[in-house]
Amino acid sequence: MLHGSETWPVRKENVVALQRAEMRMVRWMCGIKLKDRLPCKEELRERLGIDDIALVLQQNWLRWYGHVLRKNDANWVKKCMEYEVQGPTPRGRPKRTWKQVVRENCQARKMNREDAMDRCKWRKMLKDVR
């Protein structure tokens, strides 16, 4: 369901849609119908041993971000991440970019670029939020 999600610049509506789809699948795996209204979401996730999809999305973004930061400066992937498009911009509010999403997640978890250079530390910081 999250294949390639490392580079998705999702909106809140997208996260909500993913959470709804995930809960449908979780209820289906547990054999519970929506009209049964038995356990809460967290209890079902615990039963299956899975995390909230929003948390998994954040971890995917930050894991990829750390991977790219550790790359050589000459690498084309890293160059693409830093590339700014030239030319006029369309009217209205600009769309939310992947870079903005990652920056917000890093600030929320108190992570910075220097932490990414130590892979073990970066991975540990990603897992600590659970």
Image (cartoon, rainbow, N blue to C red):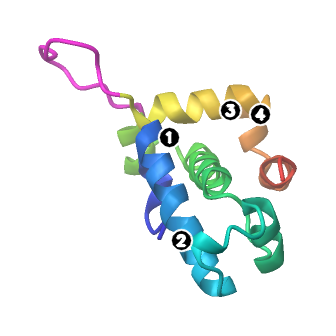
What amino acid type is highlighted by mark number 4?
Arg
| Crowd around label 1: few <14 · some 14–19 · many ≥20 (10 Å) | few
Front disc: 2 or 3: 2
What amino acid type is highlighted by mark number 3?
Cys
Q: Are marks 3 and 4 in contact (CB under 8 Å)?
A: yes
Residue 12, image x, y percentages: 47, 38
Distance (Cα) linking label 1 and label 3: 21 Å
The answer to if 130 sits in the magenta stretch is: no
| Crowd around label 3: few <14 · some 14–19 · many ≥20 (10 Å) | some
Give above or below for 8 relative to 31: above
Span shown in magenta: 82-95
- The residue carrying mark 3 is 106
Q: Which mark is residue 24?
A: 2
Q: Main secondary structure of the magenta part?
A: loop
Judge from the rendering whether residue 70 lies leftward or rightward of residue 49; answer left or right. Answer: left
Q: Nearer the viewer, residue 129 or 49?
A: 49
Q: Are marks 1 and 3 in contact (CB under 8 Å)?
A: no
Any part of residue 111 in sight: no
Counting residues from the start of the chain, the first of labels 1 and 4 encountered is: 1
Q: Secondary structure at mark 3?
A: helix
Judge from the rendering whether residue 94 lies leftward or rightward of residue 13; answer left or right. Answer: left
Counting residues from the start of the chain, the first of labels 1 and 3 encountered is: 1
- The residue carrying mark 4 is 109
Distance (Cα) linking label 2 and label 1: 43 Å
